Image (tube, rainbow, N blue to C red):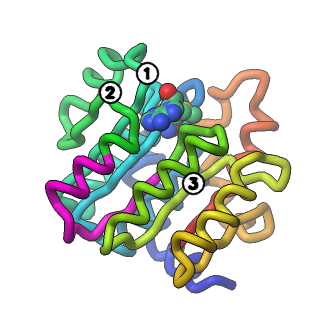
Amino acid sequence: MHYFIKESRKYLDSFVEQCCINKIPYIKKGVLNIEAFYWWSLVGYFKPDVILESGVAYGRSTEVLARAQVFFNIPYHYAFDVDPKHYKYVSKKIESYKTIYQIKSSVEGFNEIKNSNPKAKVVSIIDGPKSGGAFANVLKSLSKFPNLCAIGCHDCMPTSRIPPVLKSHCKSLFPERHLMFTNKEINRDIQFVNDYICDEMGEKRDELLDRSNYVGLCI
Ligand SMILES: C[S@@+](CC[C@H](N)C(=O)[O-])C[C@H]1O[C@@H](n2cnc3c(N)ncnc32)[C@H](O)[C@@H]1O
């Protein structure tokens, strides 16, 4: 088993307490709790200076990471989305946190942060863009950070478009890093975290629950 999977379980109790019992309701397009748990663990394990998030939509992952920022005392959490449609809704939802949320492409946002804080220790979570080329461009912009700790992605089912892009780009951009994908077997012990939200998912519930097992981690 990859060392990070073992390490991640040390953050399970805090995740359940902070994001399951103190619930973040499921929202359309949002990450499920298995995925959110890995983002939470990456932040807890690496304790970066900066969390960089790409793809906010209605902001479920954003609220998880906003809580992680407070819980683990992380100086900065930046969240970017190109689409302004949910700006008001998300801004209101996260107003009590310290997250800096901007309507901007992540490549542009990440580059600005790299220029203003070049030595920052960074953990990045990518949940959009989903198309191969745009996703690869976000990876390229992350490769310019000299202190990148880890990248977390999801929707990494074997049939998805994301794993091949991750495999080829992580190999060329981050040759010293290990890329791994979680699956149902690896997540057998944490299936229960989705119970906190599974009644809210509607007709796509089974598909979403299944999909949440496939997380990509470049560490
Ligand atoms: C699946 S949704 C994100 C869901 C969110 N992470 C959550 O858990 O609630 C994907 C989002 O990625 C955004 N996106 C697509 N391309 C982007 C880019 N180049 N930079 C930033 N955001 C992008 C889309 O506008 C969309 O809102």
What residue range appears in magenta? 110-125
Q: Is residue 87 above or below residue 60?
A: above
Mark 1 CB lies closer than 8 A to ligand 1: yes
The local secondary structure at tag 1 comes to: loop
Determine if residue 5 is in view.
yes
Circle number at residue 83? 1
Q: Amino acid at mark 2?
A: Ile
CA gap, disc 1 to disc 3? 19 Å
Q: Is residue 200 above or below residue 32?
A: above
Q: Amino acid at mark 3?
A: Cys
Q: Residue at x 27, y 34 (%)?
A: 101
Residue at mark 2? 103
Residue 36 at x, y percent in the picture: 51, 51
Asked whether the residues under the numbered discs 1 and 2 touch, taking CB atoms below 8 Å apart as contact, a structural biologist would say: yes
Residue 32 at x, y percent in the picture: 59, 43
Neighbor class of circle 3 (other Cα within 10 Å; few <14, some 14-19, many 20+) is: many
Residue 195 at x, y percent in the picture: 64, 44
Tell which tag, 1 or 3, sits nearer the viewer. Answer: 1
Residue 154 at x, y percent in the picture: 62, 51
